[in-house]
Image (spheres, rainbow, N blue to C red):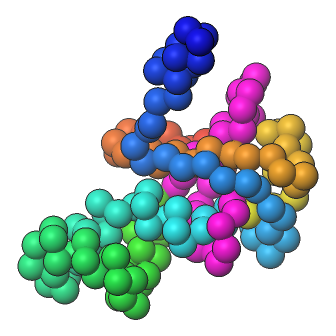
Amino acid sequence: GIEGRFRETLLGKRVDYSGRSVIVVGPSLSLHQCGLPREIAIELFQTFVIRGLIRQHIASNIGIAKSKIREKEPIVWEILQEVMQGHSVLLNRAPTLHRLGIQAFQPILVEGRAICLHPLVCKGFNADFDGDQMAVHVPLSLEAQAEARLLMFS
């Protein structure tokens, strides 16, 4: 019906540099870290990895860089690690009712398909590990990255 169309077109937009997955416990993580699955991380940081491959003369153009990413060459994961060290990500659990509903974290690559979180940060999100999902966003501008870093330690 019309309500379904309304929801589909207005509420269901895709957002670049973002992803969503189930959260699982990551007891080995620090409070300021979150575990990002490789599959999500390579999508989120693809443009940065492409730039890294070209800058390090591993790929001569975007097409070659993308094929190296598609083929999951080992150098791709090394560059992804470097890129992720310099970037914070924002995690959000809907509904965002207060300031702690969105928090910044240092991403760490993990195996699997779920986002890993330290159990002690769940209270702010009102999250638990019974199938809750969270959205992850990459702040792009230098100003947004600086604000995310500031958020991470406040």
User: Left or right: where does residue 9 sit relative to residue 133?
Assistant: left
Above or below, 114 relative to 28? above
Q: Position of residue 6 (x, y in %)?
A: 53, 13
The C terminus sits in image quarter: top right
Outermost residue toward the bottom in this view: 74
Point out the stretch of residues depicted in magenta: 88-115
Disc tally is 0
Q: Is residue 48 visible?
A: yes
Q: Position of residue 134 (x, y in %)?
A: 69, 46
**Quarter of the view holding residue 96:** top right
**Quarter of the view holding residue 141:** top left
Outermost residue toward the front in this view: 1
Residue at 55% x, 9% y is 2
From the viewer's side, name the closer residue of 81 and 16: 16
Above or below, 150 relative to 114? above
From the viewer's side, name the closer residue of 41 and 88: 41
Residue at 80% x, 39% y is 125
The N terminus sits in image quarter: top right
Above or below, 134 relative to 75? above
Q: Position of residue 41 (x, y in %)?
A: 50, 64
User: Left or right: where does residue 9 sit relative to residue 101?
Assistant: left
Above or below, 45 relative to 89? below
From the viewer's side, name the closer residue of 38 and 91: 38
User: Left or right: where does residue 84 sit relative to residue 152?
Assistant: left
Q: Is residue 32 visible?
A: no
Magenta span includes 37: no
Outermost residue toward the top in this view: 2
Residue at 61% x, 65% y is 36
Q: Position of residue 101 (x, y in %)?
A: 72, 34
Residue at 85% x, 44% y is 127
